Image (tube, rainbow, N blue to C red):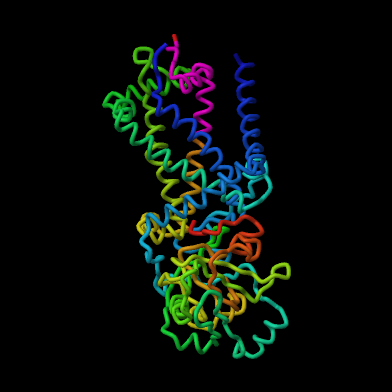
Amino acid sequence: MIRRHGIATRIWHWVNAVAIFILIGSGLGISNAHPRLYWGRYGANFDAAWAQLPRFPAWITIPASYNLAISRRWHLFFALVLGFGLLAYMIASLLSRHFQRDLKLTRRDLNRGHIWADVKAHLAFRFHDPERPREYNVFQKLSYIGVIFIALPLVILTGIALSPGMDAAWPWVLDLFGGRQSARSLHFIAMTLIALFAVVHLVLVILAGPINEVRSMLTGGWRVPE
Amino acid sequence: MIARRKLLTGGLAGGAGLILSGCDRVVQIPAARKILFAGEDMQRGLHRALMARNALAPEFTAAQRSPFFRPNGTRDPGTDAYRALQAGRFADWRLQVGGLVTRPLSLSLSDLGAMPQRAQITRHDCVEGWSAIAKWQGPQLGTVLRAAGLRDAARYIVFTCADLYGGEPYYESIDLIDAFHPQTILAWALNDRFLPVMNGAPVRLRVERQLGYKHAKYLMQVRAVASLDGIGKGQGGYWEDNVDYDWYAGI
């Protein structure tokens, strides 16, 4: 048994899991109000859309029956949880050096032979290097870096760009994404990436031994696989 | 092992379903609803803290406008009173400015046109998610309110409209920060023409740092009040009263 996850990581993980779940459900409810995506500064029914989204069914939206106002209440409350949660987690993990210690890609990680060996190990359902059980493998590092430093900041900043109030406060967010409707499209794309991450993450937790993995995220204790 | 995995996968899917339906139960609990709805106050507080009082909404060039500015909500009030005003090209229309003011006003379209004008090309964001960019022109609401002279007790400006929802006029309200914001205008022109009926003729509110439903169309009355209690159902607007839309629509 080793200590796998620090307290900040464990708290953030579960708060974030709930926030993302609710944000996706309520976000799909909001999408049903106008299921068209555009590029550029403006975009409405008579303008060309690059994507016509499906109507998301009741079993996946919050609330189940279409209610834009209540979807927005859920979404805008948990947007604060997501945004400030990520901010606090980033500060805590920089101070504790968790990021520098555990997520930094090393020369060894990026060695071609090593990556290939990791691919084969994954295909054989072996997810931990028995000699370095504490370390994340290169795919874990890349996906955590991708979600913590790219997908989550992207979904938060594009969300901020959707707010007409914040556009007055921080006009640079609009310039960053090329206009509000581009930001709305990117918001949807970033959500899709996060949802894909969550699905792969859950599948891997199940494959890697769900009881040991979930326990390590609750108590911090993780049994090193033989 | 396989059985355990199946159980877990089933458990995950079932758990997700439970949380989803749980969310719908949660909003029925008054205390939980109160917390969830407090998100609006937190967002408004954050916005007010992060933005300068007169921070401007982005403005655009003529070439960046939408080819067509789509209407939403009421396309035509259609009441006898409105029809009569429309038949006279709104010559008989008067905007009543009253409530907590020292000099109540009754303003015609030409009175509004004679005041100092502000023209702005801004983006209109509907709560549904679409945006359209257009040019608006009219006097600043602040000019009108200063002419009427707000009393000290005034805290909100309430707009009453000519279009009816379930027999009651549409209404909206904003605070004094937005009321005196330089881009908050009483627009009588859209893209250099008189407002079409579908876009709120003869005059609509533009309150550029908030969503479209705050931009009351078909304006008839502007009133300064101390509190929103007792107006409609007390939530500050038709949609706020009837479908739980946020009163602060800056997001």
Residue B168 located within the stretch drawn in magenta: no
- Where B71 falls versus B202 (above or below)? above
Residue B154 visible in the shown view:
yes
Prevailing secondary structure class for the magenta stretch in the rendered image:
helix
Residue positioned most to the left: A107
Residue positioned most to the top: A226
On the rendered structure, is A155 left or right of B247?
Answer: left
- Where A85 falls versus B92 (above or below)? above
Q: Identify which residue is drawn at 48% across, 87% down.
A: B113
Q: Percent from the top left, x then y, of residue A96?
A: 31, 28
**Of residues A15 and A160, the one drawn nearer to the viewer in this rendering:** A15
Q: Identify which residue is drawn at 36% across, 61% down.
A: B52
Q: Percent from the top left, x then y, of residue A121?
A: 43, 19
Q: Percent from the top left, x then y, of residue B129?
A: 54, 58
On the rendered structure, is A115 left or right of A73?
Answer: left
Residue A202 located within the stretch drawn in magenta: yes
Q: Which residues, given as a range, are shown in magenta?
A: A198-225
Image quadrant containing the N terminus of chain B? top right
- Where B141 falls versus A59 (above or below)? below
